[in-house]
Image: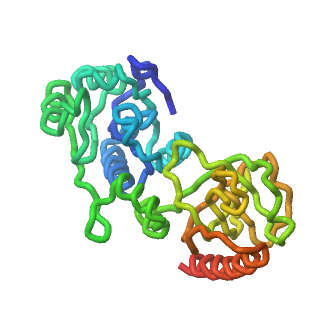
Amino acid sequence: MTQTDSWSFPAAQDGRHVVSIGTFDGVHLGHQHLLERAGARADELGVPLLAVTFEPNPAQVIRPDKFRGRLHTPQQKLDRLEEHADDIVVVPFTETLMRESPESFLERLVTSTDPVEVWVGEEFALGHKRSGDIARLTEIGAALGFTLVAVARREFGGQVVSSSRIRQLILDADMETAELLLDYPYRISGEVIKGAQIGRTIGFPTANVVPPALLVPVPDGIYATIAFIDESDEARGAMTYIGTRPALNTGERLIETHILDYSGDLYGHVLHCDFLRRLRPDATFDSLDALVAQLKNDEIAARKALREYNEL
């Protein structure tokens, strides 16, 4: 993986490439379809596939007031892209780049990577005010010596698979459909911090994580989740609460995960939570006993959801 500065791609690489360009937020089924087709073409031609992406998400720069959050962190995106591409270039998306012409951007791309073909989604556009639409990019490609290939967007359930659609599914707490379109569960990770430690006094100790600021926020409630600790690939069934804990009246939003059948100390460790299904919305309780009774029901529901998930 190579990260560029604002004005240049990395030093010229040996040989020609097939290049795929996109924001790739989520690396969802639609992105995978594009990358798989581009990768197959690269194999036919005997050249590497280079994925070119942007950080931060262009929407954060262009319309920060309308930005609804990312589907994963920059590192998670790179990890997913590495499953499909031979190399990755991360282009910093700045206001300067936003104003650049598509001709200028592609000239630098050609100088460094010498693309045989450039693959993009059919709605892709490049340059100031999206001036480089598919028709214009095709003309620029012909002038610069590469072929532009625009791939039709993939559909699921009669609708186009898109990052914006998946964001809305998460905001609606439809984690199951979001997973189908992403091809993996929506994940939130963070370092475990000390909480009020009420959970351990009532038989439900939790690992607490502050929700990442730039990810799509998961609606408040209780979820069946799968937890991973640090870099371990051992999946642990869990139930996760996300919300402001009305009973404590702090207003602080936290993610609290109770890992089933686990009693280790997780302070300072990184916890990764894969959200499978919302079990119920957040609620207030008249007493601690009522809360405990509900948590026991939540645990039963979480175990059932986890069994069903493992049987898929």
Left or right of 188: which side holds 139? left
Q: Nearer the viewer, residue 210 or 16?
A: 210
**Is residue 100 rendered to the left or right of residue 169?**
left
The one of 216 and 49 positioned closer to us in this rendering:
216
**Residue 65 point in image, percent of width and height:** 39, 38
- Please state if 74 lies on the left or on the right of 226 as rendered: left
Q: Horizontal and vertical percent for residue 182? A: 44, 59
Would residue 50 be visible to someone looking at this image?
Answer: no
Q: Quadrant of residue 115?
A: top left
Snapshot colouring: rainbow
In the image: residue 163, left or right of residue 150:
right
Residue at (52%, 42%) from the top-left corner?
Answer: 214
Q: Inspect this view and state whether residue 227 appears.
A: yes
Q: Total label count?
A: 0
Q: Residue at x 21, y 38 (%)?
A: 148
Q: Residue at x 78, y 73 (%)?
A: 288
User: In this orientation, which residue lies closer to the viewer: 31 or 60?
Assistant: 60
**Which residue is rendered at x = 22% and y = 47% of the image?**
122
Looking at the rendering, which quadrant does residue 307 occupy? bottom right
